[in-house]
Image (cartoon, grey):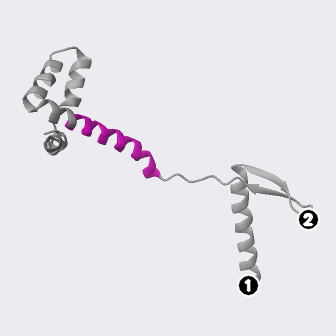
């Protein structure tokens, strides 16, 4: 009797799981035997880390741009441009804060100076 109960519970879990999947959307098809079947729509799972990739790409691009500008203009000239921005409107001050020299920008700028020579 116990094996019959386990078998029933297993089938019941399978039916419940299929109903949950069907509740999220399904496609109705006719099998080659003429039986009407409902198949759940398969949804691709997107990894949660994938949402960080565009943000990290933008941040890396900004750091590379800042490093390139620092290497191209030189540290003194770049600091002068940022200082000029800091004296402007709110948007200019925000830009000065974003474009300020940070350790990553400095490291990229130093390494790019070798290539820009």
Asked if residue 110 is positioned above or below residue 42 in the image, the reply reads: above
24 with respect to 38 (left or right): left
Q: Which residue is mark 2?
A: 33
**Mark found first going from the N terminus, 2 or 1:** 1
Span of residues in magenta: 48-67
108 with respect to 62 (left or right): left
Q: Which residue is mark 1?
A: 3
Q: Residue furthest top?
A: 89
In terms of image quadrants, where is residue 67? top left
Between 99 and 26, the one nearer to me in the picture: 99
Q: Residue furthest front?
A: 117
- In the picture, the quarter occupied by the C terminus is top left
Residue 76 on image: x %, y %: 7, 29
Name the element at disc 1: helix
> What is the magenta segment's predominant secondary structure?
helix
Between 110 and 90, the one nearer to me in the picture: 110
Q: Residue at x 21, y 36 (%)?
A: 68
């Amino acid at each position: 009797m116990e094996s019959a109960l386990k078998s029933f519970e297993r089938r019941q879990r399978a039916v419940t799981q299929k109903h949950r999947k069907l509740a999220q959307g399904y496609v109705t098809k006719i099998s080659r035997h003429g039986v009407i079947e409902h198949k759940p729509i398969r949804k691709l799972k997107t990894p949660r880390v994938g949402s960080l990739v565009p943000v990290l790409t933008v941040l890396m691009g900004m750091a590379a741009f800042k490093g390139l500008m620092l290497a191209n203009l030189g540290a003194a000239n770049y600091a002068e441009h940022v200082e000029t921005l800091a004296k402007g409107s709110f948007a200019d001050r925000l830009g000065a804060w974003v474009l300020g020299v940070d350790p990553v920008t400095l490291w990229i700028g130093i390494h790019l100076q070798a290539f820009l020579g």
